[in-house]
């Protein structure tokens, strides 16, 4: 059965294919995924499935493309949280919960021990302001795509966001960013959690200072 976030990705794909610029971006992304140009951790921070990204259906490539574009242009800010270990298999919720107990302050993770079709695997919260980092799109010389621009800080007040552990589709990550305005990703083979904050969606509400001049807030009509 197709989920709501997969249907949203299909609609996104149709919109992107109707735009020559986005069509070209999709073509380039597909070629880069086949060549393995992007660091595996970067792609996994957005989506990870049993299939290699080069073989994802086109709507998932579209969701990945849109998210990477917004990261590169400073619409999404990021904070890396050291866990010290990688996730165990999805069924090992007790083990994964134990691995998450040692997060550095002020972060705290709660893993749903049953999940049972819930929209996320748990939550990540913090009790003090934290600094996330957004791209300014001002280029610097570096081989990594996400690190090829000057980064600027964006301080975020205490809140709680969905946590996704292990496998998750790019469309689900994009849906969390659109609906909740943020998501935390702990991918297989990664010993860090990547906190992603959509500045257009919730930046005005969680930020400790006004939004950057190049970011326009959007509530998607909500």
Image (cartoon, grey):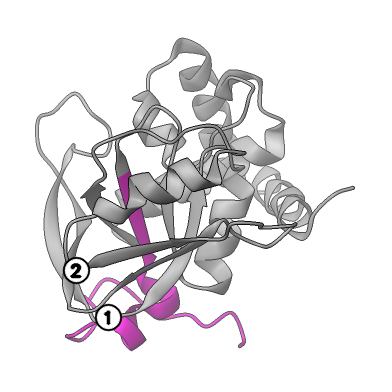
Residue 65 rendering spot, x and y as whole percentages: 51, 41
Left or right relative to 140: residue 50: right
Q: Residue at x 43, y 15 (%)?
A: 36
Asked whether the beta carbons under mark 1 and mark 2 sit within 8 Å of each other, the answer is yes
Q: Nearer the viewer, mark 1 or mark 2?
A: 2
Q: Residue at x 44, y 33 (%)?
A: 43
Question: Which of the 4 image quadrants contains residue 204?
Answer: bottom left
Q: Quadrant of the C terminus?
A: bottom right
Residue 63 rendering spot, x and y as whole percentages: 59, 46
Query: Camera-side residue: 115 or 194?
Result: 115
Query: Camera-side residue: 161 or 15?
Result: 161
Left or right relative to 162: residue 62: right
In the displayed structure, 151 sits above or below 119; it is above
In the displayed structure, 24 sits above or below 210; it is above
What span is in magenta?
Answer: 193-222
Instruction: Identify the disc placed on residue 158.
Output: 1
Query: Camera-side residue: 189 or 94?
Result: 94
Within 10 Å of disc 1 (Cα), the crowding (few <14, some 14-19, many 20+) is some
Q: Secondary structure at mark 2?
A: loop
Left or right relative to 152: residue 222: right
Instruction: Identify the disc placed on residue 25.
Output: none
Q: Secondary structure at mark 1?
A: loop
Pick out the residue farthest to the right.
Answer: 1
Left or right relative to 142: residue 41: right
Question: Which of the 4 image quadrants contains residue 108?
Answer: bottom left
Residue 203 rendering spot, x and y as whole percentages: 33, 78
Residue 38 rendering spot, x and y as whole percentages: 37, 25
Any magenta on residue 56? Answer: no
Any magenta on residue 195? Answer: yes
Q: Earlier in the sequence, mark 1 or mark 2?
A: 2
Which residue is labeled 2 in the image? 106
């Amino acid at each position: 059965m197709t989920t709501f976030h997969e249907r949203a990705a299909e609609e996104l794909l149709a919109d992107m294919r109707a735009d020559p610029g986005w069509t070209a971006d999709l073509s380039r992304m597909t070629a880069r995924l086949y060549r393995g140009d992007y660091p595996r951790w970067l792609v996994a921070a957005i989506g990870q499935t049993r299939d290699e990204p080069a073989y994802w259906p086109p709507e998932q490539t579209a969701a990945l493309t849109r998210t990477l574009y917004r990261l590169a242009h400073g619409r999404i800010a990021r904070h890396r949280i050291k866990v010290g270990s990688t996730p165990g298999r999805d069924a090992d919720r007790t083990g994964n919960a134990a691995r998450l107990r040692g997060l550095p302050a002020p972060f705290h993770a709660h893993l749903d021990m049953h999940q049972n079709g819930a929209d996320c695997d748990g939550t990540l919260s913090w009790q003090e302001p934290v600094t996330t980092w957004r791209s300014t799109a001002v280029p610097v010389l570096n081989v990594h795509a996400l690190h090829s621009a000057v980064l600027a800080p964006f301080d975020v007040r205490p809140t709680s966001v969905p946590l996704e552990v292990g496998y998750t589709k790019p469309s689900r990550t994009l849906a969390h960013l659109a609906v909740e305005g943020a998501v935390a990703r702990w991918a297989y083979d990664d010993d860090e959690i990547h906190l992603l904050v959509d500045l257009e969606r919730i930046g005005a509400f969680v930020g400790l200072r006004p939004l950057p001049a190049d970011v326009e807030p959007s509530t998607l009509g909500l």
